Image (cartoon, rainbow, N blue to C red):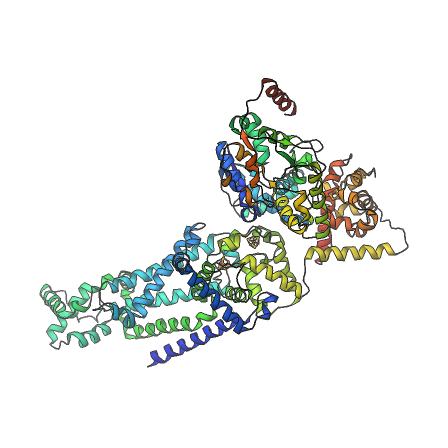
């Protein structure tokens, strides 16, 4: 399996640990990544200029198409932006024709054949829980994780196709595989406030503050996010809401970091302490993997059969 | 004499220009906050930062940066081998020519005994180095013509720089070629070094040089008789070869000479070598004089910047020294276009048609701004669009071969623009739309605009779906903004279902100016909730585009 990695504008500079941990994990899973110099996914442009948003997104799709690859994104806003553009283009021949024409000037043929998937979709669908489970050598015993699904992955669900928008289970199952507990919490499907960070600071902060509170109320040990904008939003808000934020949120962690730990990758290679708030303490939760009882095993199987 | 005077003049202009530049590095302020440091403070801070770096063992890193990043351009190797090769060719060729040719008599002669520009290896080396520069220039032209984005930004200055270097190089080669064929040169050299006077001997020597080294004499002055040639070669052996390597070793010039053969006599008669000599050295001197005022300055400022970057940490350094560093960056850009080729939002210029989105152009705009010429307000608005289209991806900063921290400058640019009354365009459009809506709300009439508006929202095809709204309020119930607010109708003006319904009534202005539109999180909860598939969030997006378009003067 091979994908074109779409790291986005923010990850390489502000969250390189997201890319390094993803690469390590994917390597262990035998998934190859091709370096393509993509441009902006279009998401930031989307607030003011529809046409340039569409062209930017389409150019990325065309670049992947030229290599005959599907795109694997790390950021959920990139995912949403690219997927939304795909659907706009698919439904509007005029837009499609204009974009094709402009890309052709650059020698890019665009037919919209490249698919876009988030890392977690690849792990869940293309790799599969079973294979993941085979590679897990350690467990995150007793770790209570609150996970944030991410607006632009979940919705509009007809376009993103990430999961059921009201009762998603994909990430919960990914967390189960590594032996952690995905706790129910109020903010799971809600917004982190990132889109308003530079537009209305007060509102943006009060939204993420809500999420912090909800994580605190649920008594989670750590918050799991897999979106670069959410990651940046939390980093910013954690500082802004200091010192109250410390009591509510003990750490933030990316799924590839968790999976990496469980697969036996050295914690120092996963840069858990680069996250803000840091997550280095998670390696304390690592325990040898206990054999799964046949009933449990079949339960997992039954559940995943049901969901898929 | 003329040579000396023009050289001195060029040196003086160059020195004055450099002094002026250095002064500007201490005086111009890129960020408004940098204004508070007087030149003396900036100089002291800069020197002490550098001093501290040197004494804390960073000298090695600085020299490393100078050699690897400055001279050898290792920074560009990663993204373009052609660009790297071009630079290395030009750098080695140019430096070599400067040391062994331009400063041959002053420098090389003192280092190597027996230096003679007409002897190997110098004769051969000069052509070799010249060819390297030409190859480098050729690669640059090739890239400028073929690489997407580079073509777009190539300016008159870039073209003039290329033409200029080519003139220097070609005049050098042509001069050498003419000298090879020139009978006049032969005669004067002969007189000076061999000093033959017997006509038989002169005839023989001429014949040998015509035969072996390509000198062109007037018809009848030479012969190809074997005996004559043998004598000529012997004379040459005795008198010439000690300080004259075969002309063929200047391989490029020799080839050029072969091409010019038919014209050689005429050109020699017209004193062409003399004229070319003037063209060659005068163009070199003009280059020297103009160095501080053109992009050639990057030869000085680039290495300085790269070394400083290796020595200090921008985040923690003395802000007064940082002010100097930023000012230096205004003079470091070689307009190579690397930043623009790789910029994450460069693709948008196809649709926004604003060159100032491209980092190389944005940097020039900033440089003009801080030097005090702002241009008109339209241009400022254009620069602002460039500044705010950037996604802050840091690619430009990471890739700039000169080590310019462009992202640091973009922050300063936004602050400067803000001071000129050009803040975040999003906010400006939002405020403008909100004001218009307020005015409309404060009048007493009932607002209905029948029909008509469906065609306003057409960008995404689905945006017209507002007409399917049956006002069930599912969207509003799902909206976190509504949920968070105690009196949502006061803080948001209109709720999601009300915006949809307003559009159905044709109330574009009112919908566009609702604070809901401008504070929408784009979380898509409303759209997901709508039982009739009204694309609520996408419609809110589209209202922002309409407003932005209206604000930019193009009526939507
Ligand atoms: S800023 Fe750097 S990369 Fe951009 S044109 Fe100037 S020198 Fe080249
Ligand atoms: S930081 Fe901005 S200007 Fe620089 S490459 Fe990225 S988008 Fe372009
Ligand atoms: S949910 Fe749909 S139909 Fe109901 S009010 Fe909102 S836009 Fe209208
Ligand atoms: S997308 Fe905007 S309007 Fe819709 S629910 Fe989210 S915040 Fe409310």
Q: What residue is rendered at 70% in x and 52% in y?
A: A201
Task: State which quadrant residue A117 falls in.
Answer: top right
Residue A113 appears anywhere in the view = no
Task: State which quadrant residue A173 falls in.
Answer: top right
Residue B1 picture location, percent across and down: 32, 81
User: Would residue B128 appear left or right of B372 to someone viewing this image?
Assistant: left
Residue A221 picture location, percent across and down: 63, 37
For the image shown, how many numbered marks are present on the structure? Answer: 0
User: Would residue A133 appear left or right of B141 to someone viewing this image?
Assistant: right
Report the front residue among B371 and A178: A178
Is residue A200 positioned above or below A19 on the image? below
Q: What residue is rendered at 69% in x and 47% in y?
A: A244
User: Would residue B132 appear left or right of B529 to someone viewing this image?
Assistant: left
Farthest residue, direction top? A294
The C terminus of chain A - image quarter: top right
Report the front residue among A215 and B402: A215
User: Would residue B105 appear left or right of B430 to someone viewing this image?
Assistant: left
Farthest residue, direction left? B227
Task: State which quadrant residue B36 falls in.
Answer: bottom right
Q: What residue is rendered at 63% in x and 45% in y?
A: A229
Residue A196 picture location, percent across and down: 69, 49
Is residue A186 positioned above or below B212 on the image? above
């Amino acid at each position: 399996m091979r994908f074109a990695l779409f790291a986005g504008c923010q990850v390489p500079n502000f969250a390189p640990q997201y890319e390094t941990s993803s690469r390590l994990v994917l390597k262990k899973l035998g998934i190859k990544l091709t370096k393509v110099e993509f441009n902006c996914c279009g998401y930031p442009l989307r607030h003011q200029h529809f046409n340039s948003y569409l062209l930017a997104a389409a150019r990325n799709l065309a670049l992947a198409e030229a290599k005959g690859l599907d795109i694997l994104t790390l950021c959920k806003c990139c995912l949403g932006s690219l997927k939304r553009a795909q659907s706009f283009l698919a439904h509007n021949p005029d837009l499609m024709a204009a974009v094709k024409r402009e890309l052709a000037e650059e020698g890019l043929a665009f037919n919209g054949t490249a698919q876009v998937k988030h890392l977690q979709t690849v792990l869940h669908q293309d790799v599969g829980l079973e294979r993941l489970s085979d590679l897990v050598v350690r467990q995150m015993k007793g770790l209570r994780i609150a996970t944030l699904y991410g607006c632009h992955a979940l919705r509009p669900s007809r376009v993103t196709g990430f999961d059921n928008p009201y009762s998603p289970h994909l990430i919960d199952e990914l967390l189960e595989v590594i032996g952690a507990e995905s706790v129910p919490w109020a903010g799971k499907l809600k917004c982190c406030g990132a889109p308003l960070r530079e537009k209305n600071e007060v509102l943006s902060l009060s939204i993420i503050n809500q999420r912090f509170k909800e994580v605190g109320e649920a008594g989670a040990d750590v918050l799991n996010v897999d979106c670069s904008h959410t990651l940046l939003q939390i980093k910013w808000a954690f500082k802004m809401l200091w010192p109250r934020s410390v009591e509510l949120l003990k750490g933030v962690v990316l799924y590839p970091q968790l999976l990496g730990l469980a697969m036996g990758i050295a914690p120092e290679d996963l840069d858990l302490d680069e996250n803000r708030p840091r997550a280095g303490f998670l390696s304390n939760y690592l325990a040898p993997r206990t054999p799964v009882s046949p009933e449990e095993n079949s339960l997992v199987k039954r559940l995943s059969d049901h969901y898929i | 004499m003329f040579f000396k005077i023009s050289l001195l003049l060029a040196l003086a202009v160059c020195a004055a220009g450099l002094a002026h530049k250095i002064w500007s590095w201490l005086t111009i302020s890129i960020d408004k906050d940098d204004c508070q440091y007087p030149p003396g403070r900036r100089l002291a801070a800069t020197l002490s930062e550098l001093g501290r770096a040197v004494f804390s063992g960073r000298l090695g890193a600085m020299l490393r940066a100078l050699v690897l990043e400055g001279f050898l351009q290792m920074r560009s190797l990663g993204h373009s081998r052609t660009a790297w090769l071009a630079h290395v060719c030009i750098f080695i060729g140019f430096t070599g020519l400067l040391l062994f040719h331009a400063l041959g008599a002053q420098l090389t002669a003192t280092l190597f005994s027996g230096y003679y520009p007409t002897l190997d290896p110098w004769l051969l080396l000069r052509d070799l180095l010249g060819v390297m520069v030409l190859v480098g220039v050729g690669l640059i032209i090739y890239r400028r013509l073929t690489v997407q984005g580079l073509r777009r930004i190539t300016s008159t200055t870039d073209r003039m720089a290329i033409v200029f270097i080519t003139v220097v190089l070609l005049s050098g080669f042509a001069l050498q070629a003419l000298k090879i064929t020139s009978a006049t040169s032969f005669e004067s050299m002969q007189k000076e070094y061999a000093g033959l006077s017997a006509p038989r001997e002169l005839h023989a020597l001429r014949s040998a040089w015509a035969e072996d080294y390509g000198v062109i004499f007037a018809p009848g002055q030479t012969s190809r008789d074997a005996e004559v040639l043998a004598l000529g070669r012997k004379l040459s052996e005795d008198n010439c070869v000690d300080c004259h390597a075969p002309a063929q070793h200047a391989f490029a010039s020799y080839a050029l000479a072969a091409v010019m053969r038919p014209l050689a006599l005429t050109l020699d008669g017209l004193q062409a070598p003399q004229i070319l000599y003037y063209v060659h050295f005068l163009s070199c001197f003009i280059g020297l004089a103009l160095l501080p005022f053109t992009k050639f300055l990057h030869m000085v400022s680039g290495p300085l910047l790269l070394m400083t970057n290796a020595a200090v940490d921008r985040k923690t350094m003395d802000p007064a020294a940082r002010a100097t560093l930023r000012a230096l960056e205004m003079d470091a850009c070689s307009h190579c276009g690397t930043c623009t080729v790789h910029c994450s939002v460069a693709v948008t210029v196809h649709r926004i048609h604003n060159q100032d989105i491209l980092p190389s152009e944005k940097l020039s705009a900033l440089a003009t701004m801080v030097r005090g010429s702002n241009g008109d307000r339209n241009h400022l608005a254009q620069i602002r669009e460039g500044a705010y289209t950037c996604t802050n991806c840091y690619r430009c900063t990471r890739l700039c071969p000169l080590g310019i921290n462009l992202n640091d400058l973009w922050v300063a640019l936004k602050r400067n623009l803000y001071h000129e009354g050009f803040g975040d365009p999003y906010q400006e459009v939002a405020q403008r739309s909100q004001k218009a809506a307020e005015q409309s709300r404060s009048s007493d009439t009932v607002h209905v605009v029948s029909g008509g508006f469906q065609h306003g929202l057409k960008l995404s095809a689905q945006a017209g779906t507002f007409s399917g709204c049956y006002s069930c309020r599912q969207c509003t119930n799902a909206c976190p903004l509504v949920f968070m607010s105690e009196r949502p109708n006061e803080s948001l003006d209109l709720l999601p279902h009300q915006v949809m319904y307003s559009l159905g009534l044709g109330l574009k202005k009112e919908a566009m100016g609702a604070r809901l539109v401008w504070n929408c999180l784009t979380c898509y909860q409303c759209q997901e909730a709508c039982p009739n598939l009204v694309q609520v969030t996408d419609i809110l997006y589209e209202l922002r585009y309409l407003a932005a378009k209206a604000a930019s003067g193009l009526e939507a």
